[in-house]
Image (cartoon, rainbow, N blue to C red):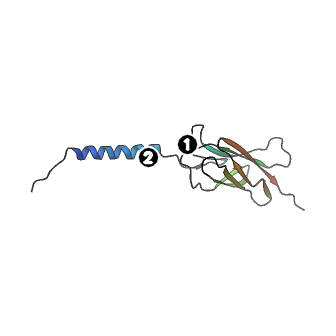
Amino acid sequence: MAVIRSPWLPMWLLILAALALLAWGLSPPPAEAAEDSYTWGVGRTGPCVVVIEPCGDEPDCAAVVRFANRLVWGATDLPAATLTLDGLAVVVSVDQRDYRTPDVLVVTPPPGYRADPPVIGVEDDGEGVVVIRPVPMS
């Protein structure tokens, strides 16, 4: 029995391998959570970032959570992340919305603290701030 070998078969395999590598290289990086920041997406002005920072001179403040929202490609189904600053851990979650709809940041502080406000909507290429405040004990 004669085996017919096509000169095109190796070329098709090379093309498919090249396309797979190209698709892998163009895929957005996964969301990454560090101790004090949460970053995801690829956009022309940079990635989206949520960071927890010291308050500065703000009275009655334990920490500040800043959300730099960028119009990014490929960011969907983001998991919640825990950000910490000097032992204070807050959980942040982001609901990425469609283009021209503000993305929503939800900040959940630990017991004994409150987020002011706990939920904010931030336009693409905009920034939002949530202040973490201690709850007065009676």
| Residue 57 lies in quadrant | top right
Label 1 is placed on what type of residue? Val
Location of residue 49 in the rendering, given as x and y in whole percent from the top left corner: 64, 44
Q: Position of residue 6 (x, y in %)?
A: 19, 47
Numbered tag placed on residue 24 in the rendering: 2
User: For the view shown, which residue lies furthest in the top direction?
Assistant: 45
Please name the residue shown 14% across and 51% down the image: 4
On residue 42, the disc is: 1
**SS label for mark 2:** helix
Give the numbered dot on residue 100: none
Drawn side of residue 20 relative to residue 88, left or right? left
The numbered mark, 1 or 2, whose residue comes first in the sequence reads 2
Image: 113 above or below 7? below
Residue 30, position in %: x, y? 54, 49
* SS at mark 1 in the image: loop
How many angstroms separate mark 1 from mark 2 (CA)?
14 Å
Q: Is residue 32 left or right of residue 68?
A: left
